[in-house]
Image (spheres, helix red, strand yellow):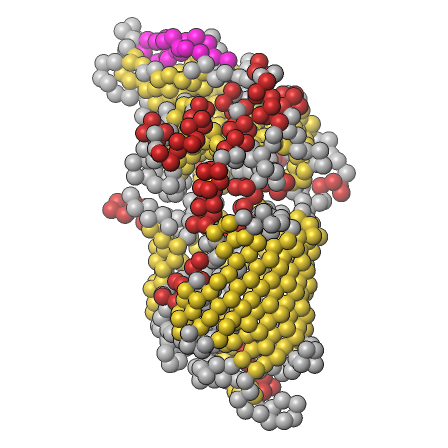
């Protein structure tokens, strides 16, 4: 089985763009590199020492400013800063301090109360003026939301940066980093957090974006792209303007698959408190400044402020961050800011968008552990409103496309294309990545990380592994050893060869297998594959289950592995992707299946001749698989790709025909399967996933060729199997099954004070199947002991807790039917590992 990490191989081993190194060495474009002034600090009351929230902080003489948060902290960053920072608030004296341009500095302010006496003010009860403004914002959302337009077109410039943070002197002095000391010349300091960081990745794209309101369609054509260290078209598509779209006018803002309540949601007053803190002209438009904070702890909400235009009640700009106690893994902070501009005097269009994430694997002492900043900055210009293109232009299912001339590497072109210039450190990222890749010690560490992640050790043109299958155990073979490998990308990025051999000490048989993958095309995907094997196999095992010779599958079992069959298999397939979202796979497969003593093959009648205890079943079948996943997005490596999900249900139709007398095949049959699966958010109460599958087999076949419903005899939770069903327990020739799970992401446990800090999350699931076996197939072969038909539904349900130490999940599962079957468990506790934000 190919490792999922190989899908990301291009991210680690791609070729960097070479032009920047030349340009930086000769310095021909040094005059266009921008310098940035960064200031952060805290504002307090000079008399009491208390922190002051919602205080205005700005570069004096400019319109660049912000307000302090609930802890009195602020951060400013600008390429056009003045020489001083001013702080002002009602009831306090305005204070100004000098700053040094083009540097990072911390400035704390202690404001003196204003001693001017005010006449007596009588406060009468009434509605909060901030809530009055908010209601008008909500009422005018349909008029100000750009996604309500019929058509729109604009140019987008998107810059994505990844920076390693918490770069301390102690970290720099580590022996392991001695060969990389030159990279620390690029260290900078974040104005938002005060953390030192090192730029390690940078991508830039320029694209033309086209939007249609009805039916809702968004299409992006990338006209220019440059990525440090990577030469991969599919990665470039993923790093365009489409990544992590945020629309504040939506009731819910989806971040890391979780629905955060928008501060201008229709029900926002149920989740936020609002404060009117300022009013001022912004670009000659009078605006009100509203600050907002959540009403309750540990909900998916934001804290921040927004400026509201006084006439249209549109959002002029906002700054907000997710609340610190939100139940989100690996994210210390996430900040969003957007600016809008009025186009043609009536349309509010997004003109600037910035998202900053502070990632860290562990919360413990996170200020000392290495983490990462992820920053996405986008700007938009050249708006064209309500000028539609031809209908066919919007009908393509490919959402993001790259023009043939998109890969632009020379700096002179990018100086003209960028909406804003790079900082000096950003411009040197390309040079740094190129230099790193020439260091043998760096490439050694890449190999070590790949080995740990993929299970394969890369050596030249070969990858040896998976090492977790080197030694395993089962009842049929006893102790089993295996040697396996495959060609690496250094051998070819179009052809991959793989093979293995294994030996069981009990049965004293040699097993083997091999295959190839040849990439005829990568976008769209066109793949030719072939494989053969002679090895043991667990029939009726789900696709997500561990391999039969995976070491952990040998150790964590509730029943012995004594139902294995010996299989000889030859297969070939061709996958043809017509366009993004629609593909067909045509395959031929020839199999010989030998019975074991635990599950004998007993045929009552075959071609008029009665038989008993046949030892081998021979089949030859041709199949056609159709897969439709509208607007699905992928991240692709050289040979495999990983799905990043689709907004719509994924539909698969599989048809197979068993051909008699072909390579001594004994059976003729038709098999049809249909499956639908999808995941979706439910307000802010978490997310759900479902899968429905139905199938039917026509023709007389023995029970091993029927649908063997996937069971699980390990203690590891398998989402694709019935976890309390034994292998071979149920078979059908027509059936329908379903699975539904909901992840509550802490909706209940977050309300329990003693459990709140653990950030555990609740999950519930239910699955079932019903089907039957025709009289002809029941009389054709004798079902072994412990195998039944699903004449009445089989059900199981479970409750679980996930996010234990951020990676573990524990499920309690109850079997709800067929209690009378022998050797079954009515209740089980299963564990699994998963990585999720």
Q: Residue at 59% of width from left, 18% of height from top?
A: 26
Q: Is residue 351 magenta?
A: no
| Image quarter in which the C terminus is found | top left
The residue shown at (26%, 45%) is: 753
- Is 761 situated left or right of 517 in this image? left
Q: Who is closer to the viewer here, 613 or 690?
A: 613
- Where residue 173 appears, x then y in whole percent? 34, 29
In which image quadrant can residue 11 be found?
top right
Asked if 630 appears above or below 710 in the picture, the reply is: above
Answer with the quarter of the image where residue 587 lies: bottom right
Any part of residue 337 in sight: yes
Question: Residue reaching furthest left?
Answer: 48
348 and 716: which is toward the camera: 716
Please tell me whether residue 96 belongs to the stretch shown in magenta: yes
Q: Is residue 234 above or below residue 672?
A: above
Is residue 820 toward the left or the right of residue 226 in the image?
left
Q: Determine if residue 689 is in view.
A: no
Magenta residue span: 79-101
Q: Looking at this view, is 96 or 377 the one in front?
A: 377
The image shows residue 711 at horizontal and vertical percentages of: 45, 70
Residue found at x 52% / y 35% = 437
Percent from the top left, x then y, of residue 412? 65, 21
Q: Is residue 179 above or below residue 343?
A: below
Instruction: Classify residue 260 by image quadrant.
Output: top left
Q: Is residue 750 above or below residue 594?
A: above
Give the tally of numbered discs. Answer: 0
Residue at image location 65% in from the left, 50% down from the top: 494
Residue 431: percent from left, percent from top: 54, 27
Q: Main secondary structure of the magenta part?
A: loop
């Amino acid at each position: 089985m190919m490792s999922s990490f190989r899908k990301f191989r291009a991210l680690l081993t791609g070729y960097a763009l070479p032009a920047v190194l030349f340009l930086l060495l000769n310095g021909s474009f040094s005059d266009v590199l921008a310098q940035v002034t960064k200031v952060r600090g805290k504002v307090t009351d000079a008399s009491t020492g208390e922190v002051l929230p919602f205080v205005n902080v700005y570069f004096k003489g400019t319109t660049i400013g912000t307000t302090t948060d609930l802890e009195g902290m602020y951060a400013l960053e600008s390429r056009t800063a003045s020489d001083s920072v001013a702080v002002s608030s009602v009831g306090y004296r305005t204070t100004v301090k000098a700053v040094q341009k083009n540097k990072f500095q911390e400035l704390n302010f202690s404001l003196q109360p204003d001693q001017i006496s005010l006449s007596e003010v009588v406060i009468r009860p009434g509605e909060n003026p901030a809530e009055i403004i908010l209601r008008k914002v909500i009422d005018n959302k349909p008029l100000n939301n750009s996604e309500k337009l019929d058509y729109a077109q604009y140019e987008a410039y998107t810059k994505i940066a990844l920076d390693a943070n918490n770069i301390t002197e102690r970290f720099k002095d580590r022996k392991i980093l001695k060969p990389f000391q030159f990279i620390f010349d690029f260290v900078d300091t974040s104005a938002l957090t005060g953390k030192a960081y090192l730029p390690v990745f940078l991508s830039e794209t320029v694209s033309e974006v086209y939007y249609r309101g009805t039916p809702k369609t968004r299409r992006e054509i990338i006209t220019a792209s440059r990525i440090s260290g990577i030469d991969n078209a599919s990665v470039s598509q993923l790093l365009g303007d489409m990544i992590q779209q945020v629309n504040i006018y939506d009731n819910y803002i989806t971040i890391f698959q979780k629905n955060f309540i928008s501060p201008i949601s229709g029900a926002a007053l149920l989740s936020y408190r609002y404060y009117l803190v300022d009013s001022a002209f912004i670009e000659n438009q009078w605006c009100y400044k509203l600050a907002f904070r959540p009403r309750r702890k540990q909900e998916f909400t934001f804290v921040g402020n927004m400026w509201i235009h006084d006439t249209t009640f549109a959002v002029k700009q906002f700054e907000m961050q997710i609340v610190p106690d939100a139940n989100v893994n690996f994210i210390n902070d996430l900040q969003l800011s957007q600016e809008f501009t009025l186009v043609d005097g009536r349309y509010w269009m997004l003109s600037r968008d910035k998202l900053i994430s502070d990632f860290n694997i562990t919360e413990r002492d996170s200020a000392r552990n290495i983490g990462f900043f992820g920053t996405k900055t986008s700007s938009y210009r050249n708006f064209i409103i309500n000028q539609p293109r031809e209908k066919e232009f919007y009908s393509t299912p490919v959402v993001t496309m790259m023009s043939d001339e998109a890969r632009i590497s020379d700096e002179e072109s990018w100086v003209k294309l960028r909406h804003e210039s790079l900082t000096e450190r950003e411009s040197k990222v390309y040079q740094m990545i190129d230099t790193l890749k020439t260091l043998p010690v760096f490439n050694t560490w890449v190999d070590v990380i790949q080995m740990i992640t993929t299970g394969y050790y890369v050596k030249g043109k070969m990858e040896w592994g998976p090492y977790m299958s080197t030694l395993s155990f089962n009842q049929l073979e006893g102790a089993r050893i295996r040697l396996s490998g495959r060609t690496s990308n250094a051998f070819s990025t179009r052809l991959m060869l793989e093979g293995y051999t294994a030996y069981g000490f009990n049965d004293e048989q040699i097993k083997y297998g091999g295959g190839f993958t040849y990439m005829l095309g990568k976008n769209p995907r066109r793949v030719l594959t072939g494989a053969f094997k002679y090895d043991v196999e667990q029939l009726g095992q789900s696709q997500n289950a561990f391999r039969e010779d995976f070491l952990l599958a040998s150790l964590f079992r509730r029943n012995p592995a004594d139902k294995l069959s010996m299989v000889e298999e030859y297969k070939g397939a061709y996958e043809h992707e017509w366009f993004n979202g629609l593909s067909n796979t045509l395959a031929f497969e020839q199999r010989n299946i030998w019975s074991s003593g635990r599950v004998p093959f007993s045929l009552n009648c075959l071609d008029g001749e009665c038989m008993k205890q046949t030892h081998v079943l021979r089949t030859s079948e041709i199949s056609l698989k159709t897969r439709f996943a509208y607007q699905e997005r992928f991240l692709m490596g050289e040979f495999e790709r990983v799905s990043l999900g689709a907004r719509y249900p994924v539909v698969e139709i599989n048809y197979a025909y068993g051909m008699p007398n072909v390579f001594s095949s004994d059976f003729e049959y038709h098999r049809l399967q249909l499956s639908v699966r999808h995941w979706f958010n439910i307000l802010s109460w978490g997310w759900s996933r479902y899968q429905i599958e139905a199938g039917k087999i026509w023709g007389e076949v023995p029970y091993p060729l029927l649908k063997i419903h996937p069971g699980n005899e390990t203690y590891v939770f398998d989402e694709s199997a019935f976890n309390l069903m034994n292998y071979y327990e149920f078979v059908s020739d027509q059936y329908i099954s379903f699975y539904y799970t909901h992840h509550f992401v802490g909706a209940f446990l977050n309300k329990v004070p003693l459990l709140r800090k653990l950030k555990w999350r609740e999950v519930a699931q239910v699955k079932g199947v019903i089907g039957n076996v025709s009289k002809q197939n029941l009389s054709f072969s004798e079902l072994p002991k412990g195998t039944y038909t699903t004449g009445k539904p089989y059900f199981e349900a479970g409750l679980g807790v996930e996010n234990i130490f951020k990676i573990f999940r524990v499920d309690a599962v109850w079997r709800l039917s067929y209690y009378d079957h022998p050797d079954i468990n009515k209740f089980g506790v299963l564990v699994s590992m998963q990585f999720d934000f």
